[in-house]
Amino acid sequence: MSHRPLSVGVFSPSVLLRVARSVGLLQEHGVSVTEVQVESSPDLFRDLLDGTLDAAFTSPDNVIAYRFTPDNPLGRTGDARILAALDHGLGLGVYARPGVTAAVQLRGTTVGVDAPGSGYAFGLYAVLESLGLRPPGSGRRDYAVRTLGGTPRRLSALLDGRCAATVLGAGSELLAEDAGATRLAGLVEVCGRYLGTVLTAVGPHGARAARPLAEALARTAQLIVPGELDATVLREARTALGLTPQQAARHATRLRDPDEGLVPDGTVDLAALRTVLALRLRHRPDDRSLATALEPERGLLEPRTW
């Protein structure tokens, strides 16, 4: 079995993808992947819609935005589809810069987001609101919002003082914690079951081309969750994310976590996806057409054929 190489967009290096390659599951499913790191969700979806990228790892909220809402940062939509669920957030939480130990200290500061109208930003607003800070759009807001791009850029901005708080996960939160940042609260504990990352592609041809990758990733997650690939996970986490052995061990534990870890078969948890959609509707109430976004006829979820 052979398929043409896939260019896959990511914000941060993917341990899941690298483990799949390392243990031969990409090859077994007839797929080769070039990992392309992008700086922001608009950059990622511009390349997806233009065909420069074949698939991407991203928040499901981004797929919703670039499929259904023409006022997204690109000002255009496309047939973006969710092929598989990859994880439940991997520790996604709101982190404050070193020296800030309580949400009240963020009043009057600037927080960093990928894009102000995106899923992780909505999660950040919800967490800070639960801690007593009013979000943008609420009249008198308690903090300013700055667009900083993907996770590596936000982590750097947090640690060098360009923002007072941001959302981090998937290993970046471990680097932040060990650099003195404070975890104020997690998205799961505030918002409920959450879908952090999905595999997306555009159109029926894109979905068919990326299906073997979805299969390989699901099989890899099935082996990681019970701990069968721990040695490989530890090695790839250290290499891909620049983690210490201790941080890599904590990341491996998080990958196996039933509430925030990997999705072992790629099946989209509709309750978790509804949490993502509810956050968008809460902060963008004018998007009324999204109320039915998860209905099968709207085409957001690619039917499982594997």
Image: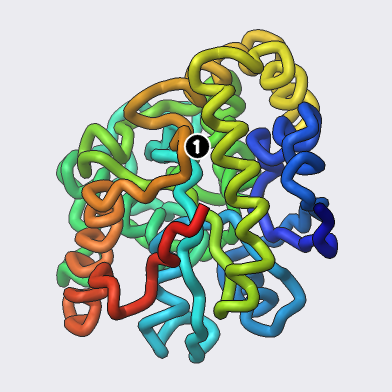
**Which scheme is used to colour this image of the protein?**
rainbow
Q: Which residue is drawn at 25% across and 40% down?
A: 193
In the rendered image, the residue lying farthest to the top is 246
On the picture, is 118 further left or further right than 26? left
* Mark 1 crowd level (few <14, some 14–19, many ≥20, 10 Å Cα): many
Q: Position of residue 276 (x, y in %)?
A: 29, 56
On the picture, is 23 further left or further right than 248? right
Q: Position of residue 168 (x, y in %)?
A: 49, 40
In which image quadrant can residue 287 be found?
bottom left
On the picture, is 120 further left or further right than 234? left
In which image quadrant can residue 122 be found?
bottom left
Residue 288 vs 181, above or below: the answer is below
Q: Which residue is drawn at 40% across and 87% down?
A: 71
Q: Residue at x 69, y 60 (%)?
A: 9
Q: What element carries label 1?
A: loop
In which image quadrant can residue 175 be found?
top right
Q: Which of 238 and 164 is in front in this view?
A: 238
Q: Residue at x 40, y 39 (%)?
A: 88
Q: Where is residue 104 in the image (x, y as percent from the top left)?
A: 24, 38
In the rendered image, the residue lying farthest to the front is 1
How many numbered marks have been drawn onto this rendered protein structure? Answer: 1
Q: Which of 169 and 16 is in front in this view?
A: 16
Q: Which of 217 and 136 is in front in this view?
A: 217
Q: Which residue bears the numbered disc 1?
A: 169
Residue 166 appearing in the image: no
Q: Position of residue 173 (x, y in %)?
A: 52, 31
